[in-house]
Amino acid sequence: MPTVTSCKFHSFLAILFTFLSYSFSSIFTITNNCPHTIWPGTLSGSGSPPLPTTGFRLDSGQMVKLTSVPGWSGRIWARTGCTFDSTGIGKCQTGDCGGRLECDGNGAAPPTSLFEITLGQGNEQDYYDVSMVDGYNLPLLVQPRGVYGTGTCNATGCVTDINRGCPKELQVVGGDNYQGGVVGCKSACEAFRSDQYCCSGEFANPTTCRPSYYSILFKLACPKAYSYAFDDATSTFICKAFEYDIVFCPNSNRMQKPNGATFPPSPPSIEWPDEKVQQVNSSSDILLPSPGTIFLFVVSLFVFGTKTRTLI
């Protein structure tokens, strides 16, 4: 039968495991730089627990930090044109997730700009991308912060306002609040429901499913984002970071109302952050333990455990 002292030692090991797991969690900092309110939504992948919230209101200029767990995978997006009652039931013009404020396991209704990520556990790398495979509703920029480990981390996203030049056959037009403007741009798959555009059926492989006229337009507008299902080579990024900044409408002061024009090139005023992010401390206002602090904590517990087992 284990002694009381032995149980205490095992309890300390459990605390150590929990402490280290939390220390290496990543933070998603979501910022609304749009001139209007958005309602971010989150969806966890299979086997990943939900984030602290799965849907919430974020007014213009506001920022929210969500803490994940190691190994978390899922999606983050923004809904627009939402109305919810006091019980959280309602609907959104774009990105709706089951007609509720909290998405609770429901994904985003297309068209929606998506941030997708799978966090590595331990020393494993993170894999992330911004996808327009399900269409587009808002510009967004994702910037890793607090990089650690080997390798470099790249900013990614889609900062061009694609709604301004969305082809008519892909347009989603808003209600009165948008004065009939385009609030979303469908993917060709969503608009035409064909295997060729959806990379399904006989086109369900990278050999037969090639970039279409529409996916090429998306890619020209946003070269770093996924434009169709097999657009992996230039759209998936690998990193190891404490924090990911997710900014919706990063250049909102330069955005203009939809005008039905053709896709514009990236404006000269839009500059990507440096491709290589140096290893720096997290920019979060949540203080993360330094490696030195973690090391001293581990050594202290090890010494305590050794002494404890000597007394048993």
Image (spheres, grey):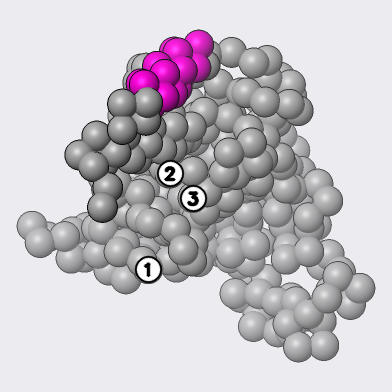
- Give the Cα separation between the discs numbered 3 and 2: 6 Å
Counting residues from the start of the chain, the first of labels 2 and 1 encountered is 2
Q: Are marks 3 and 2 in contact (CB under 8 Å)?
A: yes
Type of the residue with mark 3: Trp
Nearer to us in this view, 160 or 119: 119
**Identity of the residue drawn at 50% across and 11% down:** 292
**Identity of the residue drawn at 23% across and 42% down:** 3
Q: Estimate how packed mark 1 is, as few (under 14), some (14 to 19) or many (20 or more) residues with alpha carbons within 10 Å.
A: some
Nearer to us in this view, 44 or 293: 293
Please indicate whether residue 183 sits to the left or right of residue 310 in the image. Answer: right
Most extreme residue toward the bottom is 201
Q: Is residue 78 above or below residue 17?
A: below
Query: Picture coordinates of residue 91 (x, y %)?
Result: 27, 65
Q: Which residues are magenta?
A: 292-308
Question: Label 2 belongs to which residue?
Answer: 69
Nearer to us in this view, 137 or 272: 272
**Identity of the residue drawn at 26% across and 52% down:** 1
The answer to whether residue 27 of the structure is visible from this angle is no
Type of the residue with mark 1: Asn
Type of the residue with mark 2: Val
Element at badge 1? loop
Check if residue 42 falls in the magenta segment: no
Question: Label 3 belongs to which residue?
Answer: 72
Please indicate whether residue 251 sits to the left or right of residue 236 in the image. Answer: left
Check if residue 296 falls in the magenta segment: yes
